[in-house]
Amino acid sequence: MPNVEVYCTVSNCHYWADANHCAAEKILVTTDEIGEIYPETVDASETRQIVNQHGPTEAHGCVETCCKTFTAKKQPPAGTPKRMGTGTAATGWKQ
């Protein structure tokens, strides 16, 4: 498996890390059309099932693709102070 750096600017994703890196071990990128069919819980481990059911997918541009690995960060309980400074979303909350 190639060692690839994945960059992401979605700061409320659980996998968002320092310098806008994606910290997920595996990611699933598919077309919006296929992404809309499956629930939010579908991820890279279901890739074979998706391809078996729908075949390879084709996009005509990047705006027709989506990252199914996106997982929203859990919000801190009400009243929890936010972390200050320049820390990243992967290690805490920023104001």
Image (cartoon, rainbow, N blue to C red):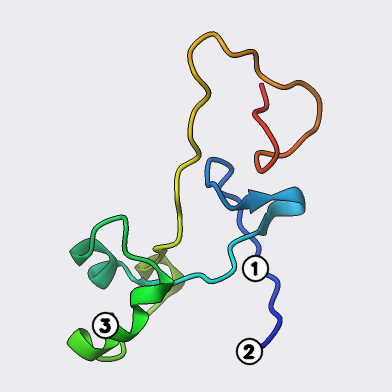
On screen, residue 45 above or below 83: below
Amino acid type, mark 1: Val
Amino acid type, mark 2: Met
Q: Residue at x 23, y 90 (%)?
A: 52
Give the residue at the far top of this rendering: 79
Q: Residue at x 35, y 80 (%)?
A: 47
Residue 25 picture location, percent across and down: 59, 68
Name the quarter where the C terminus is drawn.
Answer: top right
On screen, residue 2 above or below 94: below
Amino acid type, mark 3: Gln
Q: Mark on residue 62?
A: none
| Disc 2 element | loop
| Disc 3 element | helix
Reading the image, the residue beneath label 3 is 49
The answer to whether residue 26 is seen in the rendering is yes
Give the residue at the far right of this rendering: 85
Q: Which is more toward the observer, 64 or 42?
A: 42
Name the quarter where the N terminus is drawn.
Answer: bottom right
Q: Is residue 64 rendered to the left or right of residue 39?
A: right
Q: Is residue 74 rendered to the left or right of residue 47?
A: right
Q: Which of the marked residues, 1 or 3, is nearer the chain's N terminus?
A: 1
Residue 70 picture location, percent across and down: 45, 55
Q: Residue at x 69, y 78 (%)?
A: 4
Which quadrant holds residue 61? bottom left
Q: Which of the marked residues, 1 or 2, is nearer the chain's N terminus?
A: 2
Reading the image, the residue beneath label 1 is 6
Residue 77 picture location, percent across and down: 49, 18
Reading the image, the residue beneath label 2 is 1
Which quadrant holds residue 67? bottom left
| Disc 1 element | loop
